[in-house]
Image (spheres, helix red, strand yellow):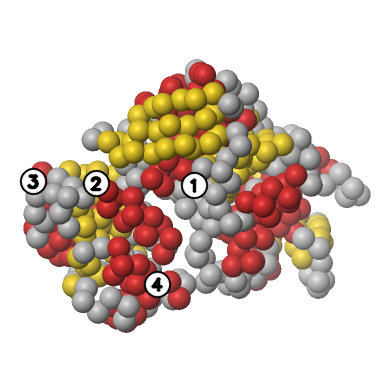
Amino acid sequence: MIMLQDLIPEFDHNMEITGITVDSRKVQPGFLFAALPGSQVDGRKFIPQAIDAGARVILTLNDQEIDVPDGVIVVYDPNPRLRFADIAASFYDAQPKCIAAVTGTNGKSSCVTFIRQLWSMLGQKAASVGTLGITAQGVEIAGGLTTPDAAGLHERLAELHEHGVTHLAMEASSHGLDQYRLDGVNVRIAAFTNLSRDHLDYHPDMDSYLAAKKRLFSDVLRMGGVSVLNADIDEFDVLKEATGSYGHSIISYGEKGEDIQLLDVQAVENGQALKMLVQDKLYNITLPLAGTFQVENVLCSLGVVLASKFDAKDVVPLLEKLEGVPGRLELIGQGVYVDYAHTPDALQTVLKALRPHTTGKLSVLFGCGGNRDKGKRAEMGRIAKEQADQIYVSDDNPRFEDAGEIRHEIMAACPDAREIGDRKTAIKTAISEMDDGDILVIAGKGHETGQIVGDEVHPFDDRALAHEVIHG
């Protein structure tokens, strides 16, 4: 039995709390309902529905008084999102003992997947959670947000704990950090991949975007934790100073890394040959993954696993056994790759990574999502023009925008591109026009199995369609 004072110790009243939620549609008798302010919808609008469904406690912002019936308690707080995260942690009260969180614009999904694979190979019961869902031995939940709401997240953490998971790698999105969804998670290791333009439809500017991600190190990472930082990015010094001031130790990786230093990378037939210095010892390994950006992801993942108190001599050889991540530079066949790249930096990184593997022409097929940052459309068009030999501009997830207008904004920067709005037709056309030695990147949707048009999600899978065209 969980009592209100178990969740909010300083509160005078006490009663049994049967559940917690931010969704009024999920309220049942005895629930605590968090009426949180949102960027689009104010949760306080749903307080009457929550009370009608049986909510006994309402948590809300302290900027105005709320009228409620007798028997219903209102808890006012200056930061109800943060308070709700703490409440969720107390309500579910179970987490894997070792939790690592990875933030950054690109590479989060790959990193948490690689970390989970390495921990598993080291004999740990490991899981990953993020864009690709929850993956663990005996647990497979597809889809879901990069960072669920605090109640959903802690419910899943408790479920993983019940399944015996001891090591968890999770994505930490800027939205989730900005909205305090990860506060209350017992994060002992925090990692940063890179920073480039993304989510400026939510964050006012890049400084705000970075500030949200820095919360992982300043507010979420537990005292005495370990920060794993990319020494090759412009933000390294800022992050190093910020995380060091909180008493965290640091593992740096990259060409400039002190703990994990990349000395050389060579493209080989089955992947990439790496020469690196790890904790002052030289290693030569063959990574079974294409793309130099994957090297960065692997080094970040290695840093996290080392931070979890495993020896380099036991971990580094396992890098040769890593498996690729669905929809992340995934080779479908005959030179056709599917990748989730949907930001300018990610698109440029993927195209540059595949150029050394191309003996013919390098082609790219992509679009941009509707109701998202419009500023990146022309930029992605410019990058495609600079990096690719052939460009196909098609639809991504147009949502409520005019798909033709989105394509027009992209093609303003790459006027010689082929415009084929229907994505199915575009993929079939692009594959049919390939010659020996060519490489085609189908970018933007990666692992997704639907295309969002208006408020409907139509079944659509780049990987499945490409496989059908290639293999029949």
Query: Of residues 332 and 349, which is closer to you in this image?
Result: 349
Query: Of residues 357 and 87, which is closer to you in this image?
Result: 357
* Residue kind at label 2, given as amino acid type: His
Q: Is residue 458 above or below residue 139?
A: below
Residue at label 2?
357
* Residue kind at label 1, given as amino acid type: Lys
Q: CA distance from mark 4 to mark 2?
A: 24 Å
Residue at label 3?
472
- Name which quarter of the figure residue 269 lies in: top left
Q: For the residues carrying marks 4 and 3, which lies nearer the camera in this image?
A: 4
Badge 1 marks a residue whose secondary structure is helix
Q: For the residues carrying marks 3 and 2, which lies nearer the camera in this image?
A: 2
Q: For the residues carrying marks 1 and 4, which lies nearer the camera in this image?
A: 4
Q: For the residues carrying marks 4 and 2, which lies nearer the camera in this image?
A: 2
Whether pointer 1 and pointer 4 mark residues with C-beta atoms closer than 8 Å, the reply is no
Q: CA distance from mark 4 to mark 3?
A: 35 Å
Question: In the visual, does 188 lie left or right of 432?
Answer: right
Rendering coords of residue 430 (x, y %): 15, 61
Q: CA distance from mark 3 to mark 1?
A: 33 Å
Question: In the visual, does 223 lie left or right of 367?
Answer: right
Question: In the visual, does 408 lie left or right of 208?
Answer: left
Rendering coords of residue 6 (x, y %): 81, 40
The circle drawn on residue 108 is 1
Density class for disc 4 (Cα within 10 Å; few <14, some 14-19, many ≥20) is some
Residue at label 4?
379
